[in-house]
Image (tube, helix red, strand yellow):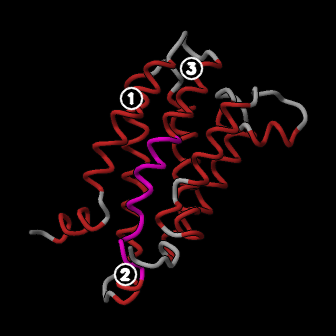
Amino acid sequence: MTAVALFLRSREVPAGVLCAIPAMAAVAWFGAGPAGSPHAVTAAALALALGIAVLGHGLGGPDSTLDATAAIRWAPRRALHLATIFVVAAVVVTAVTTVPVAVVLRDAAGFTGLAALAAALFGRRLAWTLPVVTGCVSAGIPAVPEPFALHLLTWAGQSADSRTALTTAAVFAVAGAAGYVTHGAGRSSPR
């Protein structure tokens, strides 16, 4: 077995992909409406949050102590893993929805950063928390420009021209990627 295959199996990536891709496609497809409609944007955001939450489970191995003692360079592997999650999620949702590609890319980057941040803070088992909570908040609260705090909370459901949403997603993506790539998944006890 190659090192890549072992890495993917240790992170439970094949099972995650088999669950995440159909789930993302179904949520985005069923929610797809007229191009750019708020309902379609919300469905795409939920699809991305769900898929990235499932794929985020693989951001750490089953034993964080074992990962910490391995004598390999983790940073490139972690960065590639995050990039792959982003690309897979963005491609799947873009293929089945009518939402502008800019919105899908923005939301995919933000949710990937949130999953990475959650993995770094809480461990791989809780990597799903921040993307799911943020996706549900964006879906449950209508996207309105005022008050600013509410506009900030619903960044994933905002239209493509929202600078606030783009800035928020970029901050989540950069902060999450930096924390995860440099420190890895938080410590958690093995099963």
- What's drawn in magenta, residue-wise? 49-64
Q: Secondary structure at mark 1?
A: helix
In space, the residues marked 3 and 2 are separated at their CA atoms by: 40 Å
Do the CB atoms of the residues marked 3 and 2 lie less than 8 Å apart? no
- Image x and y of residue 28, in percent: 46, 25
Give the labeled residue for mark 3.
Answer: 40
Mark closer to the chain start, 1 or 3: 1
The residue depicted at 54 percent of the width and 13 percent of the height is: 35
What residue appears at the point 70 percent right and 31 percent down from the top-left corner?
Answer: 140
Q: Report the residue that reaches farthest toward the front.
A: 191
**Residues under labels 1 and 2: Cα distance?**
32 Å
Q: Is residue 140 above or below residue 76?
A: above
Which amino acid, mark 1?
Answer: Ala
Name the quarter where the N terminus is drawn: bottom left
Tell me the residue at 73%/37% (across/down): 154
Amino acid at circle 3:
Ala
Q: Which residue is mark 2?
A: 67
The outermost residue toward the right is 147
Q: How far is the residue under mark 1 from the one under mark 3?
A: 13 Å
Position of residue 23 measured from the top left corner of the image (x, y, whole percent):
39, 34
Q: Describe the element under mark 3 as helix, strand or loop.
A: helix
Q: Is residue 164 in view?
A: yes
In the orientation shown, which residue stands out farthest toward the top?
A: 34
- Please tell me whether residue 165 belongs to the stretch shown in magenta: no
Q: Describe residue 6's horizontal placement relative to residue 191 as left or right.
A: left
Residue 172, image quadrant: bottom right
- Is residue 52 inside the magenta stretch? yes
Indicate left or right for 17 with 57 as reference.
Answer: left
Main SS category, magenta section: helix
> Which residue is disc 1 drawn over?
25
